[in-house]
Image (cartoon, helix red, strand yellow):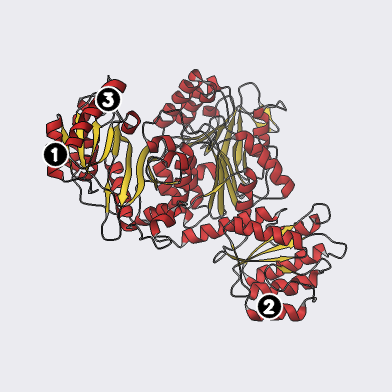
């Protein structure tokens, strides 16, 4: 992206002399932002703009042009891009609006622009964007109101309007950026392309961004996983409450929405997710300005009891641990602080504390080996030395190299101190909850950096058998496989299933039960009936031949009564498995990220309790273990109050095999194994009920 961010020559096509027009603002920013290269305005209606010779077309501009910035009406953009291609320009920012955001005609126009650009091997940013800014090269190819100050945070956004608001906010807060990128419609270059570009940018320490969608989820995860090892990525993803309009036929499909896919993907590739613009910058500034904490043990230093208690609660809610101070630290504080102080954590230096008392206590706490981060609270009292205290905190934080965040509560009185903290690169938060949240995110990121590289295990499976089953079902126009077919699929991938036989008569059912062994379960076999128990087409715990005949007749009768149009293949007679804890394994195919794997407690309550976890396939062994431990009811599986634990390793293996199946066969749209009966260690797990849906 050298031509975009370090061009030597820029042409502004559609530059204007008329104030208030986008073409005027863009040209003014390009020439007034500190850019040292040559700038050429292009407008056939004038000869000069602000002392620069104006050219009637891009072809009339002499010499090589590295970057073209297009600000012409949308209907003229295809012609302009054609001329840029003929000129040999390889980088173009299209600020013009009026494309796919306006509907069908605009979408066709945008497609035409991309086709022309592809023909000339040209890369595009936009259209319908604010533009781009690189503070370190002095490039401001945007219609933003001002050039932000230099900084170490790069910001990417799919919303131009949000860009303008954030730029205005950053000016008031004195926050700098390395690069500021408005992606617009992403007709060509997208969020993943910019992540790759920023990965190698020496001026960028942290990447933050606002996203509404991701074009290619699997590619995004590969790129983000690699970059996150070296630079933190913090993203806010909007639209999280939309679970999608597609009707779901399985438990997994009904429980999984787009937000679960994004949540899982971000977690797996080390991206920190912010829930608000406020949190986006809380995390961004903390990661840019402070070292990562080595762990979750935090000390709180305060001059007021109430805020100290609030901070303690906030830390616990955020998943942080209040550090237990070493005895020498406590003894030192007791000997040097007023008698009424609290010498344990949180350390209360009292309301009359001046800068020297803060300095003494903070220095002692930072030297404590049990402390991995410190949150310093200050409320403005009559005796408080706000500015001196801020200077003291800044000096100690720099010397100790531990994570220090501050919470100077208030506004008018503490503002001078906050400005001093900024100069010392110490993030300040107005309330303890925000400081705790930022610190917890830093700790999670540090833990993610310590994880081993994801290794994907491959099992020896029978792909040929699965391919044959799916092909046969597709040739018959089946969307949902019959349960006995679905069981064959997962069995081919090494997941144990009960003994079973398909019976077309009561006598065949009796013979099957005798062969399998008592007790047995019986259920209707039909690709059209997914929830068999809803129509009473399931009978469990059958122990005699007479009960088998009665069950066969009852299941057949109820099926004809309640589902007369359903295609019935017979009645499945199945080995009855009574022991074991019930869990659910599932998969649904997300439009952006592909196979989304689900795990949770199984049975009939899964949709009510929703005690579930998600990850994007392919899964590593660590991913699978984390999924299992993440659910609230994990202790029911690991053993509680004398109960024997379930064999967790068998769940891990089943999850990995489902993940491999989903990756091998993209035509599988949804899959449920519910329940998977997980028995005691050494006895494994067995899939009782399976549902599988295929696409075209």
Q: Is residue 211 left or right of residue 659?
A: right
| Residue toward you, 6 or 501 | 501
Element carrying mark 3: helix
Q: Which mark is residue 559?
A: 3
Callout 1 environment at 10 Å: few (<14), some (14 to 19), or many (20+)? many
Instruction: Name the residue furthest right.
Output: 382
Disc on the earlier residue, 2 or 3? 2
Q: CA distance from mark 1 to mark 2?
A: 75 Å
Q: Could you give the CA–CA distance between mark 2 and mark 3, rounded to whole angstroms?
A: 74 Å
Residue 447 falls left or right of residue 462: right
Disc 3 residue crowd, few under 14, some 14–19, many 20+, Cα 10 Å:
many
Task: State the image coordinates of residue 58 (x, y, percent, origin top left).
Answer: 54, 28
Q: Of the two numbered discs 1 and 3 on the same chain, state the one appearing first in sequence.
A: 1
Q: Which residue is mark 2?
A: 330
Q: Earlier in the sequence, mark 1 or mark 2?
A: 2
> Can you tell which quarter of the image residue 663 is in?
top left
Question: Residue beneath label 1, please?
Answer: 512
Residue nearer the viewer, 133 or 690: 690
């Amino acid at each position: 992206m050298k031509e975009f961010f370090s061009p030597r020559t820029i042409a502004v096509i559609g530059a204007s002399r008329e104030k208030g027009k986008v073409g005027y603002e863009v040209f003014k920013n390009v020439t007034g932002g500190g850019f040292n290269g040559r700038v050429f305005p292009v407008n056939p209606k004038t000869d000069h703009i602000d002392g620069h010779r104006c050219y009637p077309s891009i072809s009339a501009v002499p010499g090589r042009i590295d970057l073209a910035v297009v600000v012409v009406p949308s209907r003229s953009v295809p012609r302009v891009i054609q001329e840029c291609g003929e000129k040999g320009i390889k980088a173009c920012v299209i600020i013009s609006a009026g494309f796919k955001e306006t509907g069908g005609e605009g979408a066709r126009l945008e497609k035409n622009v991309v086709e022309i650009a592809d023909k000339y091997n040209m890369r595009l940013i936009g259209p319908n964007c604010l533009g781009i800014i690189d503070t370190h090269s002095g490039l401001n190819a945007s219609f933003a109101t001002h050039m932000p100050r230099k900084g170490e945070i790069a910001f990417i956004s799919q919303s131009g309007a949000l860009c303008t608001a954030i730029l205005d906010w950053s000016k008031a807060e004195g926050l700098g950026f390395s690069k500021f990128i408005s992606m617009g419609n992403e007709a060509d270059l997208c969020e993943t392309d910019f992540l790759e570009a920023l990965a190698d940018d020496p001026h960028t320490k942290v990447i933050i961004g606002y996203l509404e969608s991701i074009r290619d989820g699997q590619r995004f995860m590969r790129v983000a996983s690699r970059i996150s090892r070296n630079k933190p990525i913090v993203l806010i993803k909007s639209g999280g409450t939309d679970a999608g309009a597609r009707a779901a036929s399985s438990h997994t499909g009904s429980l999984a929405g787009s937000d679960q896919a994004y949540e899982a993907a971000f977690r797996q590739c080390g991206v920190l997710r912010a829930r608000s613009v406020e949190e986006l910058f809380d995390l961004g500034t903390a990661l840019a300005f402070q070292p990562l904490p080595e762990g979750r043990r935090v000390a709180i230093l305060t001059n007021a009891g109430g805020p100290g208690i609030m901070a303690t609660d906030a830390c616990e809610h955020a998943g942080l641990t209040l550090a237990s101070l070493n005895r020498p630290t406590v003894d030192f504080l007791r000997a040097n602080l007023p008698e009424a102080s609290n010498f344990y954590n949180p350390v209360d230096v009292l309301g009359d504390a001046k800068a020297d008392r803060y300095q003494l206590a903070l220095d002692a706490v930072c030297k404590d080996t049990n402390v991995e981060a410190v949150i310093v609270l200050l409320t403005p009292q009559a005796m408080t030395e706000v500015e001196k205290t801020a200077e003291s905190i800044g000096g100690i934080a720099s010397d100790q190299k531990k994570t220090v965040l501050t919470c100077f509560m208030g506004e008018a009185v503490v503002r001078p101190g906050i400005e001093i903290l900024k100069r010392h690169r110490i993030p300040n938060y107005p309330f303890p909850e925000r400081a705790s949240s930022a610190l917890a995110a830093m700790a999670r990121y540090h833990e993610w950096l310590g994880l081993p590289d994801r290794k994907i295990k491959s099992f020896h499976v029978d792909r040929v058998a699965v391919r044959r089953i799916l092909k046969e079902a597709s040739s018959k126009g089946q969307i949902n496989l019959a349960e006995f077919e679905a069981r064959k699929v997962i069995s081919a991938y090494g997941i144990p299933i009960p003994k079973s036989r398909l019976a077309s008569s009561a006598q065949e059912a009796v013979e099957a039960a005798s062969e399998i062994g008592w007790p047995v379960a019986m259920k209707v076999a039909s690709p059209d009936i997914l929830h068999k128990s809803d129509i009473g087409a399931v009978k469990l715990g059958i122990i005699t031949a007479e009960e088998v005949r009665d069950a066969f007749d009852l299941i057949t009768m109820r099926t004809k009564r309640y589902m007369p149009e359903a295609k019935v293949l017979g009645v499945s007679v199945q080995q009855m498995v009574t022991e074991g804890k019930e869990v659910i394994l599932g998969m649904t195919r997300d439009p952006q990220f592909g196979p989304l794997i689900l795990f949770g407690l199984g049975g009939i309550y899964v949709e009510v309790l929703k005690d579930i976890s998600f990850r994007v396939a392919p899964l590593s062994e660590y991913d699978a273990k984390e999924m299992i431990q993440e659910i609230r009811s994990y202790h029911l599986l690991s053993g509680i109050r004398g109960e024997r634990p379930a064999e967790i390793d068998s769940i891990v293996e089943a999850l990995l095999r489902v993940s491999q199946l989903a990756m091998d066969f993209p035509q599988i749209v949804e899959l449920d194994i519910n329940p998977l009966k997980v028995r005691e260690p050494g006895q494994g797990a067995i899939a009782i009920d399976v549902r599988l849906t295929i696409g075209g």
